[in-house]
Structure formats: C-alpha cells, structure tokens
Image: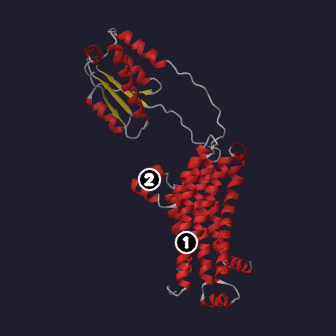
C-alpha cells in the first residue's frame, strides 16, 4: 500500500498532464456531444424528386407514373435528350423513369404469350439511396401488372385498378411495446469521443510513472527495500488499475451529469452497457501504458505517443468518422484495435430494445474481444519486464 501511495504522489507531481489530458479532453468530448443531447437516430422516409417521361400514354403507363409520383416530388421534364441529360447532370431529379412507346400494350401481349415484358429505362442519382427503393417499387408494380395480365385480363384500365387495389391492401399490424428506450445520440457521441481522453490520459500517466520509478536512483532504492519483486509488481498493477478507474470515473461523472440523467429511468441497462464499454477502453489503455512504460522512452516521447495513440484509437473506434463511411481497408485495420469492438458493442447497446440473454450476448462478446486485447498487451509488458529484470534487455 505504501508503494501505491508513492506511485500516486509521483503522478501528482505531473498534475499539468492530468489537467490537460484528463480534464480538458474529457470536457472536449462532452462539448462535442452536447448538441446531440436528447436526439435519437430514427428512420424517416424522405420525399424524392422524380421525373417520368411517358412516351406511351396508355392506361398502364399512367398508372405506373401515378405510383412513382405518389409520396414523392414530381418534376416536369421536357421530352428531349438535352433536357434529360441536363437534369441528370445537375442532379435536379434523383430518379428518372422513361416509359417507351407501346409499353402498355406490349406488356399485355407479352403476359398473354408468356414472353418477356418490354423494358423500362431508368436513371438513379448516386446521391440518393431512397431512389434505389423507388426503382424497386417501379419494377415490382410492373411485375404486378404483368402477373394480372397473365391471368387473362386484357383491359388496361381494369388491370391498373386491380394492381392499385392489391398495392393498397395493408397487412394487419400489431404494435408491440419495447422493453427499453434507445439511448440518445449525445450519450453515444460522448462515449465514442471519450476514447481519445481515456487512451491519452491513461497512457501518458502510466508511462510517466514508470519512467520515474525506473530511474537509476529510485530503482536502486526499490531494489534495496525489504520488498519482493512480486510485491512491487502487484503495487504497480494496482496503481495502473487505479489510474484507469480514476480516468474512467471522471469521464463517466461528467457525461452522466450532463447527458445521462434522463436515460437513467428509461434506459438504465443500455446506459450501463455504454459506461461498461468506456471501462473496457480504460483497461486497454492501462495495458498499453504499462507496455510503453517498459521502453522508458522519456517524457517528451511519451507525450507525443499518448497524443497519437489517442487520436488513432478514437478514429478507428468511429469517433471522428462513422465506421461504415470508412474505406474497406481502414475498416479491416480497425478490427485489430480494441476501440472497434467497444464501438460495435456501444452501437448495439444504443438500439437495444429488448433486454434478454439473446440480445446481450453479442454485446458482451465484443467486450470480451476488447478485453483480450488488454490482456495480450499487458502480458507482453510483463514478459518484457521479466526479461529486463533478468538482464536480457538493457535500458
């Protein structure tokens, strides 16, 4: 216990680093998340700018046009190649459908003969994902017309009426109340950005501590003291764990006071899982700090490494850019970092609506993978320390 107190006194002598890395960066994560407080990620259907160029003018083509424009924003285009090309180039329409002449009659005849229906021409803007769904809707509606015509009906107006009736029939829907409410985006954003402050503050603190206790004068006194190497290692591990818990506690306290109080009543399990993920990040940072401390890189190098590590870990954990938006190669690299797995678990915890073993198991599996990183890094540090103690590695 006296060794742990000595370690903490050494850390207290570097209070400027504690203020910068733990205090300022923790507040930085909170300030970034505050604009998202109270908001939740929900799906909302967006109206899409659509244009239909009808060269046919039949009852079936008019029905198809009505189906495409329903719920969207119709845009009138001149029936010319220049107007169509200009609309696509300027992105004034997100979805363009061209119905060729004779399409309606050709569809009926093809259905009666059992041959392929005439094709429709469409163009989809790369900036609109909703436009792809509209194209699927147009294809599905045309397939419905084809199927009805194949049953023997040849009157186009009757075919369109039957297709519209079948399209508008709703399935019976029963609302089921969720057992828990999804967390707000502010809680998640703060947790993701806290990986920067956690990895930076914990890594720099432990690196500075180990650099100090491994100085020749101090190390000589420790070797002369009536304590075993095992006892000294236990005290060092205890100090590393204490540093991780203190940094985690500061971040959690700030985020809970300003962002998490509202979720305590509605989503206590999800909130606990998010904060548990932050604890996993803190333990991983402690293991990395212990490993880096074995190299005795000095104060300036430790300061630089802590900054770079915090930025890299938070980036690969999806704090700065959403993980699905990253290139495939970067996402593959992110799998080899603990922050990626904690981020995956945090995202699953946010949308958790049923608290049961089936839903919680994948989250704890991700936490377990991240903890394996922490154990592997800590074991590497222990092996390096053992080699150094045996004289295999010179300072």
* Residue 123 screen position, x and y as percent: 33, 33
Q: Residue visible at 52% across and 64% down? A: 311
Tell me the element at label 1. helix
Nearer to us of marks 2 and 1 is: 1
Between residues 299 and 58, which one lies in front from this camera angle? 299
**Residue 320 drawn at (x, y percent):** 51, 56
User: Where is residue 296 shown, x and y percent of the image?
Assistant: 54, 81
Disc 1 marks which residue?
Answer: 379
How many residues crowd mark 2 within 10 Å: few (<14), some (14–19), many (20+)? some
Label 2 residue SS: loop
Q: Is residue 314 left or right of residue 22?
A: left
Q: CA distance from mark 2 to mark 1?
A: 31 Å
Which label was assigned to residue 326? 2
Q: Nearer the viewer, residue 276 or 55?
A: 276
* Residue in the picture at 55% in, 81% down: 386
Q: Are marks 2 and 1 in contact (CB under 8 Å)?
A: no
Left/right placement of residue 304 relative to residue 15 reads left
Seen in the picture, residue 8 relative to 311 is either above or below; the reply is below
Please state which of residues 30 and 110 is positioned toward the viewer in this rendering.
110
Q: Residues within 10 Å of mark 1 (few under 14, many from 20)?
A: some
Q: Which numbered disc covers residue 178?
A: none
Q: Is residue 103 left or right of residue 23?
A: left
Work out whether 231 lies above or below 51.
Answer: below
The relative height of residue 32 versus residue 293 in the rendered view (above or below) is above
Occupied quadrant, residue 254: bottom right
- Quadrant for the N terminus in the image: bottom right
In this view, the residue in front, 310 or 243, is 243
Answer whether residue 235 is visible to the viewer in this image: yes
Instruction: Please tell me which of labels 2 and 1 falls first in the chain.
Output: 2
The scheme the figure's colours follow is: secondary structure
Whether residue 76 is visible to the viewer of this picture, yes or no, is no
């Amino acid at each position: 216990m006296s060794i742990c107190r000595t370690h903490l006194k050494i850390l207290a002598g570097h209070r400027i680093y504690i203020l910068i890395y733990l205090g300022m960066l923790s507040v930085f994560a909170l300030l970034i998340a505050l604009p998202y407080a109270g908001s939740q990620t929900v799906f909302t259907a967006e109206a899409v700018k659509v244009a239909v160029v009808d060269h046919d003018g039949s009852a079936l083509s008019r029905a198809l046009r009505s189906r495409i424009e329903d719920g969207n924003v119709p845009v009138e285009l001149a029936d010319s190649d220049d107007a169509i090309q200009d609309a696509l180039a300027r992105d004034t329409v997100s979805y363009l459908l061209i119905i060729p002449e004779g399409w309606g009659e050709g569809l009926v005849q093809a259905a009666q003969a059992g041959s392929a229906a005439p094709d429709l021409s469409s163009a989809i803007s790369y900036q609109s994902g909703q436009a792809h769904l509209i194209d699927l809707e147009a294809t599905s509606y045309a397939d419905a017309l084809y199927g009805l015509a194949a049953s023997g009906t040849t009157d186009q107006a009757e075919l369109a009426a039957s297709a519209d009736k079948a399209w508008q029939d709703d399935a019976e829907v029963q609302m089921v109340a969720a057992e828990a409410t999804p967390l707000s985006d502010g809680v998640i954003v703060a947790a993701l950005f806290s990986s920067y402050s956690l990895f930076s503050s914990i890594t720099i603190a432990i690196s500075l501590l180990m650099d100090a206790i491994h100085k020749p004068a101090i190390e000589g006194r420790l070797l002369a003291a009536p304590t075993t190497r095992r006892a000294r290692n236990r005290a060092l591990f205890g100090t590393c764990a204490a540093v991780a818990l203190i940094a985690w506690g500061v971040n959690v306290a700030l985020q809970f006071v300003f962002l998490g109080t509202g979720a305590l009543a509605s989503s206590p399990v999800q909130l606990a899982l998010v904060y548990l993920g932050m604890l996993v990040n803190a333990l991983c940072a402690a293991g990395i700090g212990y490993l880096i401390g074995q190299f005795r890189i000095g104060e300036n190098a430790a300061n630089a490494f802590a900054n770079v590590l915090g930025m890299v870990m938070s980036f690969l954990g999806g704090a700065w850019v959403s993980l699905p938006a990253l290139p495939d190669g970067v996402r593959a690299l992110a799998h080899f970092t603990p922050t990626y797995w904690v981020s995956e678990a945090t995202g699953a915890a946010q949308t958790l609506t049923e608290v049961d073993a089936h839903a919680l198991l994948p989250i704890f599996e991700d936490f377990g993978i991240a903890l394996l990183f922490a154990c592997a890094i800590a074991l590497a540090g222990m092996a390096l320390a053992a080699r150094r103690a045996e004289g295999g590695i010179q300072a």
